[in-house]
Image: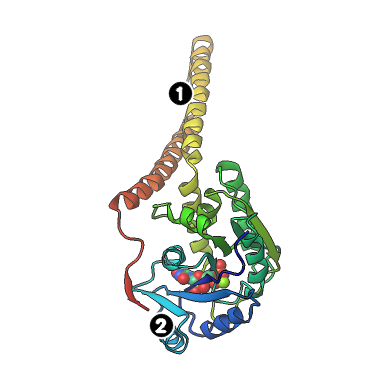
């Protein structure tokens, strides 16, 4: 148990990409959360290269309230990079990560804080129990993705888990100790382990603006997630390769026997064409899988920074 009489800080990290209409609201809602006495709050907004007035909003807020800090990127580097910058920056004994759009209720923070500060849990996570307001096809593919991730990776990717978390310093440092560039947060956070207390709530629609996730972006994101946390797709390729080898061996025997027994008028060009198409298609697919991993290795070895900071306060 932490010493409750000792004042301590809780850092609230909020990634923002074109969220000018949401910032004030999330700031106010967070301040409304009934934090225990002796708990100070600090805001770490990360402007992920917004093209609207997000940065102006943050400057205004920071000028008004000394507890507000912001980091502004030179361009859009993605939410994962924004979260990383916020976690690196936060100085509190506890860190909360929260979306700017009002889909994560800050009113849960006191309960989350209680769970983590009791010392039993290192992290409090949240998951939404419904996918209300989401297209049916998207929900279906999301479920499929979670089922697949559960099967082929050793990390426990929780269906509906949000990036709304409260963690202690130990957990935060563990997450920061992962140096990789491909920071699939639904995998990175569970990968570090520890005890996580889950809080659930129903899906809340965003307060303003629109989601930045198109179906195609989500699809690419899921491929990123799979290749970042599993090498099973490579094994599947080898497995099917071996399987095809045995099938073709059986075919060779079959054809040889038929030739010896019956003689062989030239026939079967259609089946030959099918086999050639199938095998070359499968080979291209396999090269594509290999390419995915190679691309990942390429980005890692370049060792580029995760983001570039333009301005901070
Ligand atoms: N976000 C970001 N960089 C991006 C995309 C999103 O910092 O490139 C932020 C965004 O401002 C929001 C959070 O990440 O605070 C979640 O984004 P969004 O609401 O679009 O995702 P969803 O809630 O639909 O998963
Ligand atoms: Mg959202």
* In the image, residue 260 above or below residue 195: above
| Residue 157 in the image, given as x and y percentages of width and height | 59, 51
| Residue 31 in the image, given as x and y percentages of width and height | 59, 81
Quarter of the figure with residue 118: bottom right
- Of 171 and 37, nearer the camera is 37
Residue at image x 46%, y 75%?
45
* Residue 212 visible, this orientation: no
Q: Is residue 140 left or right of residue 96?
A: right
Does dot 2 land on a helix, a strand or a loop? Answer: helix
Q: Which residue is mark 2?
A: 55
* Category of crowding for the residue at label 2, using alpha-carbon neighbours closer than 10 angstroms: few (below 14), some (14–19), many (at least 20): many
In the rendered image, the quadrant that contains the N terminus is bottom right
Quarter of the figure with residue 32: bottom right
Single out the mark in the foreground, 1 or 2.
Answer: 2
Q: Is residue 162 left or right of residue 52?
A: right
Q: Which residue is mark 1?
A: 266
- Of 288 and 232, nearer the camera is 232
């Amino acid at each position: 148990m932490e010493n409750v009489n000792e004042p301590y800080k809780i850092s609230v990290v909020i990634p923002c990409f074109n969220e000018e209409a949401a910032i004030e609201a999330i700031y106010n809602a967070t301040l409304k959360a009934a934090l225990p006495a002796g708990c100070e709050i600090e805001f770490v907004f990360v402007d992920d290269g917004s093209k609207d007035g997000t940065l102006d909003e943050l400057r205004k807020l920071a000028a008004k309230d000394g507890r507000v800090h912001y980091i502004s990127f030179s361009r859009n580097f993605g939410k994962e990079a924004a979260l990383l910058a916020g976690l690196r920056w936060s100085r509190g004994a506890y860190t909360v990560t929260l979306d700017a759009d009002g889909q994560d209720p800050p009113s849960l923070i006191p309960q989350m804080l209680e769970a983590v500060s009791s010392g039993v849990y290192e992290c409090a996570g949240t998951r939404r129990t419904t996918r209300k307001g989401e297209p049916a096809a998207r929900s279906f593919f999301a479920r499929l993705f979670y089922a697949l991730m559960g099967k082929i990776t050793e990390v426990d990717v929780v269906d509906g888990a949000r990036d709304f978390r409260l963690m202690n310093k130990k957990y935060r440092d563990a997450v920061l100790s992962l140096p990789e560039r491909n920071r699939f947060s639904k995998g990175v956070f569970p990968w570090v382990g520890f005890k996580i207390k889950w809080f659930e709530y129903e899906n809340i629609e965003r307060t303003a603006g629109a989601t930045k996730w198109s179906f195609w972006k989500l699809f690419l994101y899921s491929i990123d997630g799979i290749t970042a946390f599993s090498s099973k797709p490579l094994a599947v390729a080898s497995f099917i390769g071996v399987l095809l080898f045995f099938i073709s061996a059986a075919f060779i025997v079959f054809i040889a026997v038929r030739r010896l027994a019956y003689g062989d008028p030239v026939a079967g060009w259609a089946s030959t064409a099918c086999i050639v198409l199938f095998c070359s298609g499968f080979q291209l697919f396999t090269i594509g899988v290999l390419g995915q991993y190679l691309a990942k290795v390429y980005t890692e070895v370049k060792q580029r920074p995760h983001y570039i900071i333009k301005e901070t306060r």
